[in-house]
Image: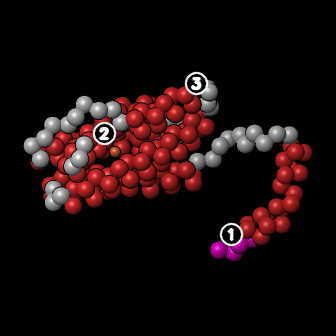
Amino acid sequence: MQTAHELFLHEMSDMLDAEQKLVEALGEQAEESSNAQVKKAFEMHQRQTEGQVRRLQQAFESLEEEPENTECAGMKGLKEEHDNFKEEDPSEDILDIFNVGAAKKVERYEITAYESLIQLATQMGYRKATQLLRQNLKEEQQTLKKMEAFSKKLKPEQMGMGEEEDMQERFTPQRKSSSKRSGRKSAA
Ligand SMILES: [Fe+2]
């Protein structure tokens, strides 16, 4: 491979496969979410992702090109992380927290991939493709923000830090600063 055009088509094909894999994975994540808001967010992003697949197909059409038959190894790996984790038999709350973290990894991966694709498309003057890719990028950025908000909100039910005495021991040195913190909170 020697040209930017070939690289662009290769990376676009990779992304198309990634988004297609994600439509399925997001459906699975929505189904297994116990938090109603998280479930809704996964369902919404699944519908968005179907639209992203269409935009990528339109970008190929705008260049009168066909996608290559490739597999996105990155997305496949992220999906494997999820499937392996489920073998650990996680509790509902822990699975939700894991899935939100996994979604953040996926969005960062996609954001970087779209940024590179947009860079190439812009350099080559592929205006229609650039515009379509920017729309996908925007949706990924919005989804990342939403997932970041969830990860701040979701609290694990059990910390599993050992015996009670053990925990007290661990927290004793920090007591002073934590009471300071709560003092500031009530003042706000
Ligand atoms: Fe996506």
Across and down, in percent, residue 84 comes to: 55, 28
The residue to which callout 1 is attached is 185
Among numbered discs 2 and 3, the one appearing first in the sequence: 2
Q: Which corner quadrant of the image does residue 127 belong to?
A: bottom left
Q: Residue at x 25, y 43 (%)?
A: 1
Across and down, in percent, residue 181 comes to: 73, 68
Q: Nearer the viewer, mark 1 or mark 2?
A: 2
Mark 1: secondary structure: helix
Q: Which corner quadrant of the image does residue 120 belong to?
A: bottom left
In the picture, measured across the screen, residue 3 lies left or right of residue 45, that is: left
Q: Residue furthest bottom?
A: 187
Mark 3, Cα crowd under 10 Å, few <14 / some 14-19 / many 20+, is few
Across and down, in percent, residue 46 comes to: 34, 39
Mark 2, Cα crowd under 10 Å, few <14 / some 14-19 / many 20+, is many
The part of the chain drawn in magenta is 183-188
In the picture, measured across the screen, residue 174 lies left or right of residue 18, that is: right
Q: Which mark is residue 14?
A: 2
Q: Which corner quadrant of the image does residue 29 belong to?
A: top left
Q: Residue at x 13, y 41 (%)?
A: 65
Across and down, in percent, residue 51 comes to: 25, 43
In the picture, measured across the screen, residue 118 lies left or right of residue 62, that is: right
Q: Which residue type carries mark 1? A: Lys
The residue to which callout 3 is attached is 87
